[in-house]
Amino acid sequence: MEVDPSSICVKPAPSAVTATHEQTGAWFIEGDDYITWKETPDSALWVHGTPGCGKTVICSTVIEEIQLCCSENPAYACAYFFFDNRNAQTDQALHEKLIRSIIQQLCDQSDSVPAPLVEIYGSGRQQVSVASLQSALQKIIGGFERTYVIIDALDECTNRMKVLAWINDLMDWKAGKVCILFSSRPEHDITDTVRGMPYIFRVTLNNNLTDKDIGTYLDAMLSKLIRWNPQLIARVRALLITGADGMFRWVALQIEALSNCRTPKAVEAQLQTLPKDLDGMYERALLDHPNQVELKQFLMWLAFSIRPLMLQELVDVVTVDFSLDGLPSYNTDLKYFAPSDMRATCSTFVTELKGIVKLAHMSVKDYLVSDRLKNSAASYFCINAMLAHSLITKTCLAY
């Protein structure tokens, strides 16, 4: 019987792998912790840090370096997974999705469908337990001389304790076959669990480590501002590196805001009022938005939709008019002339890849549902699941 791995497994989202800039993360893969981990089978490396500090950039750099290594040695394999909890879609935040994705990636790197999959699906079973998949995956890993697994944003997994238990089981296997790297925020439950795990290396991302990467990123972004004079570019670079405190996301938002300035005076004015943290950046962007009602609608849909939204779908959200008395009604005059106009007005908060729109970063959703926002000048934008589901339901009924 033929077994089609694509029918049971799910590929990882590739977008994050393309998020790096040349030379970012070089310090990490040249560091002793990384080199030791890479050369030590049955080991794990935990990369942790605050929101926006560049954990995904590091994971993407590692993936590229490991894939290059595997291309030179067919007996080596690489699999990766990016957890994503930016909307209410649960698939990309589940332990089972991780296991299925890794199985498919390793199948893609095998000459044929691995025997363990034939064994569990050869009988025609449609439903296979996670435990059976994990057992099959372990056997598949055993077919390679070395398998590297990279997992980003473990803290965004809805059942992350299961993932940590699985990682620990692989380390206890002691077959000399696997090395696992995972990143997360230093959440208490993750920290407590990792503390009891043997064979684990740890790297804390802080501004001392990431300043070089931030400088590299800034150089790449500032080089595009060809109308700026060298003195202004140097001043902006120095101020942003000083104020970044190790946060890539903060720097990216500052560059976005500064690139919209049309005169040196406007740049200087922007520099004089730089928000000190991500909350400040988000608050200013919310308060400065020209259509706050529409923006709030977009954000509620993106934060709590049960599946990813296409750009064209998101544009249609605002065609339902809630301003009139009575029931909401569909109004074509509210539709954007071009979908790209919507994306441009929300650029601080959203990202688009292949027509799919998502919140730009997990810190966006964290902020929108936080008490910090509720108690700020931008409290109008504070959202929760009940409000969002009510809006989504009314919009769908009117549409």
Image (spheres, rainbow, N blue to C red):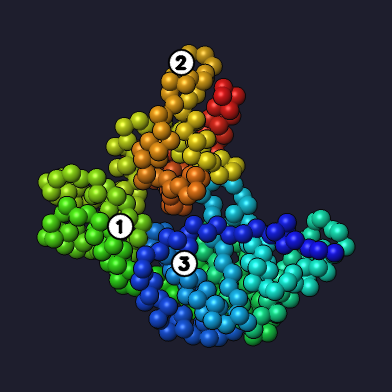
Numbered disc 2: secondary structure: loop
Amino acid under label 2? Leu
Amino acid under label 1? Val
The residue drawn where x is 44% and y is 70% is 61
The residue labelled by disc 1 is: 251
Instruction: Give the x, y percent position of residue 315.
Output: 47, 33
Instruction: Give the x, y percent position of residue 29.
Output: 42, 78
Could you say which is closer to the camera, residue 114 or residue 112? 112
Above or below, 370 against 104 in this view is: above
Amino acid under label 3? Ser
Sequence-first tag of 1 and 2 = 1
State which mark lies toward you, 1 or 3.
Answer: 3
Q: Is residue 240 left or right of residue 127?
A: left
Dots 1, 3 in contact, CB < 8 A: no
Numbered disc 3: secondary structure: helix
> What separation in Å lies between label 1 and label 3 (alpha carbons)?
19 Å
The residue drawn where x is 46% and y is 52% is 362
Above or below, 221 against 210 in this view is: above
State which mark lies toward you, 2 or 3.
Answer: 3
The residue labelled by disc 2 is: 324
Which disc, if any, is residue 190? none
Instruction: Give the x, y percent position of residue 6.
Output: 70, 59
Numbered disc 1: secondary structure: helix
The residue drawn where x is 53% and y is 30% is 391
Q: Is residue 398 left or right of residue 380?
A: right
Sequence-first tag of 1 and 3 = 3
The residue labelled by disc 3 is: 60
The residue drawn where x is 52% and y is 14% is 326
Above or below, 275 against 58 in this view is: above
